[in-house]
Amino acid sequence: MLFSLAAICLSSPANGDESRRFVAMLEDGRVVEDDVLRNWYSGNALPQLGGQALLRGSNAMRWMMDREQSPAEMPTAYIELFSGDRLPGRTLSYHAEGPHYQADLPEHFSVAPSFPFNRSNSSLRQVVRVRRDFVRKIVWQQIPALIDRYVPATLFLTNGREIAFRAIRFDEGSIHLLAGRERMSFGFHEIAELHLDASPYWDRYLNELAILFPGGKVKPSDIQRLVQWETADGLVATTSVERIDAESNNDNNNSDRWTHGIQPAWSLDTIWIACRSTWMWRSWNFDTIPLFRLPREETREGAMFSRNGFPARINRAVLSGTAQSGEHVNGWNIGVMAPSRIVFPLPPFAKSFQTRLGIDRAAADRGCVKGKVRLSWESSPKFESSFLVGSQETVESGMVRLADIPADGSLILEVDPAHEGRPAGADPFDIRDMTNWIEPMLVLDEDQLREEIEARTPHTILAWKDWTLETELSDITFATTRRKVDYPFESPSWRTTVASQKEPIRVVSRRKIAEDAKFLEIVLAKFEGPEEPNVSVQINGIPVFSYPLQNVNSGDYVHTPPPYLVNVTPFAGQEATIEVTQSIGPEGIGVDWRGLHLVEHPSFLFPVVEDPTPEDVEAMTTLEGEPTQVIVRNELRHLSRPLLEIPPGEWIQIAKFDRPIEIRERPWPGQFRQIRMSVAKPGNDGHVLIRFLHDDEDQSPAIYSMGTRDAGKGIIEIDPRKFDARKPIAENWVTQTQDLYSNFKGLDITGIAIKSVGESSCLVDHVHFAATAWDFNRQLSIVPDHSNWDNWEERSEKLLPGLIKATLVVQRPGKPPRPAILFDQRDGYLAMLGDHDWQPGTAVEVIRHDGKKFPAKLRGMDAESKLAVVQIEAIEQDGQWQQYNLSGRKEFDWKYSHLVFQPAKTAGSLAWDICRPLTCDGGTEILTKPLRMPGEVGAIAVDRDHQISGFVSQMTPNGQPVLTIAQPPEGSWEALKNQGK
């Protein structure tokens, strides 16, 4: 009898009009058949069969089958997802969570599919990346007894050994287990099947929906459907209608020429599927779920003739092959052999369940069963069928209502062999009791489901991990958006994007910034519309960055906008609150948040010389390995200080790279093409050579010269003009940006050496690699050649005598003294930094540089900038005053430094220094830490136009002054002057 059961052979389904290639079952049960599938040839078109829309409207398809295809056998190697989806192919490697080509990626596996999966015009990608958190089991060598079975937290080796484990950790090509108290390690090549530990199903399912339907909303609402492909190659993949693309390969009317690109939630890549290879499409509304996607536990107590085997099969008859009960093929089903009892977990938001039941056609007119639908918390069945005999008849359960589901509530499907009381002539016991639960479907509460999806959607944006979203979800528009790029290392894919027309989108992180962190790198992307919205950053409430978002260059990754950079060195090593904001933007323009990274070096810039230290200099040697006399220079006259002074005579290696700097024609992220460098040298005293060390130097030297037309054979003269003989070295800077690839082709640079030719030393600063020249603009840094004309050493000599006479000290009751600057000598008006309890009309005393005191009163204060006005009550025009105008600029220009000053301890003198911007956001800058004075709140800044540019409103944790612009809102001056009168 067992032999006869196993030997039953199934032929192709023989129902309906077999001359028609495609057959589809609609939601209302109607069957549509036609030879031609139409209209599914582009990304903005949806399929039609026999004039019926299949994926839109209230009567979309449940399933569609191509009769020219057949279901695949189980692949020998594949990766299986928690939902039952399956990717045929060999799992090659594991990758930990982290940034990859500037985007944050979850931990994932690289799988080499065993079927064509690229679009027709592309073969660059060799793998599909599968998210680790969706994986249920990985099969390298199929074990037939484990088909459609899942044994949680169990390893099956190729040598037949089976190991249950408590914990697992992955390396690139191996696993490490904790089994009992024993630690074990195995390479992927030693494993037949790896079944991962079980995690709560409904959490993972809701995460899947949050990726496919971000925010729980889809427009238009009649395409809120999921679609599953099952191909003749063994692929089973589910996605949403929105995440489907298509191309026709030059024939819109021939479905055999179509290719569909889909991206399941578990895939980081689009998978392209030839339409002619697809056997079955299944579809359902987002608030329903076919039972075959749920985890299940089956028992077969009481089995007699079928007790050895015959576990439940998914979307197959229990004896394999296409399931059919009654008149039509079953588009989806759970095939069982009676007796069978299957338990499925239920979520609290399940509303109802419905199914049909029938004996499979393999039994023909034999077999006899009864079916029951039970709920674990109720004693009586919710549905019980009469006797079913033969495969012609099916029975419907009707709508089984679900309410008050307990936390551990489950749905139970039972099939009884119905031996007792069976009709006359029916098979006894469990002979030929092959049964199908036909299209079993769970209906979920739509409102609760949307709430659950909306709450989970922010967590699907990996860039927001470890950040807190502080904008109400109801104010955010989430969408799944096509990332339309065609790069060698990245093909088009779908990403969750965010937009808002109500409130800015704010994410906040409270953390200790690592001591070696120098930048916050912000990776955002959008593909259309004007240069908006803006992205802005505050750290500890200090505005440090604001910039409009630019569109991604879809076809040219080299010239797409690089990430945005914010200097965080003022907060390094300290606890800080970082807030990143996306402003309100145009409707329908979503932003893809790809990464928020605190880094030592930007991903697209590589600084070689930026802020050199004595420790850096100690590590420098000649090319022969001898010590050098390189000096770190940090004098006032060098605006970009600190920098390097290279002594003349020998090649000095200023940098060594453990990992070579790769120079390429079209650099990928992490590779480079451009270099920018600044060099200074006294005029008429030789020149400077810059040498790029690499393994083939003897045959192909890579050397630049600056300052000569006679550098020698093989040396590229990038600035042959001699250094200006009229200028001192501090004002003789030359900054060059050069295309290394154009000059030297591809290089793997292992180091950089500099030689100062002649009798004098040279100065070197700001040596940076970048992919493109415009990448340099992302780094906020004053270039050294500003020193050629912006001579603050000379300026300070002219400014200080007048500043001493214009600076007064304001003594307020119960407050520490604070400096003020005279900007209106006739009427005695002073400007200074105010504070939160500024009281216009309060009487104060001001002290002049010569110690003379004057009565004064507080006038108004601008609440935003804290710019405050004080008026001397009766100013003496005795010739001991000097006034300075307040700058008329409404925003700072980060390209320029400031002279920052405050009263010194010695009466009648000033403490001062030159500070350059580290961050700039309109009316706020963080400046470099003053070295010649202790920075204090209230210090005053003068700009290059000799006007008062701002006041130090606070100090960062690492001692850098925060400068607030000395310019109130337009039209408010008179009001500020007259308050308190």
Image (cartoon, helix red, strand yellow):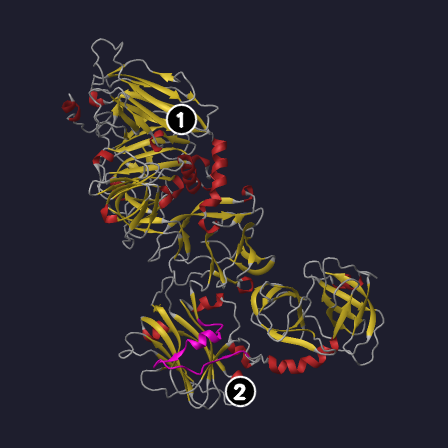
Apparent side of residue 186 relative to residue 586 in the rendered image (left or right): left
* Residue 526 percent coordinates (x, y): 46, 53
Q: Which residue is mark 1?
A: 410
Badge 2 local density, few (<14 within 10 Å), some, or many (20+)? some
SS at badge 2: loop
Q: Is residue 616 magenta?
A: yes
Q: Amino acid at mark 2?
A: Pro
Q: Is residue 255 visible?
A: no
Magenta stretch, residue numbers: 608-634
SS at badge 1: strand
What label does residue 728 carry, if any?
2
User: How far is mark 2 from mark 1, CA to CA?
Assistant: 85 Å
- The foreground one among 627 and 325 is 627
Badge 1 local density, few (<14 within 10 Å), some, or many (20+)? some
Which residue is rendered at x = 23% and y = 37% of the image? 74
Quarter in which the C terminus is drawn:
bottom right
Q: Amino acid at mark 1?
A: Ser
Q: Quadrant of residue 6?
A: top left
Q: Is residue 100 magenta?
A: no
* Residue 392 percent coordinates (x, y): 25, 18
Q: Is residue 371 visible?
A: yes
User: Mark 2 or 1 closer to N-term?
Assistant: 1
Q: Is residue 183 above or below residue 610?
A: above
Q: Is residue 405 above or below residue 921?
A: above
Outermost residue to the front: 181
What label does residue 648 carry, if any?
none
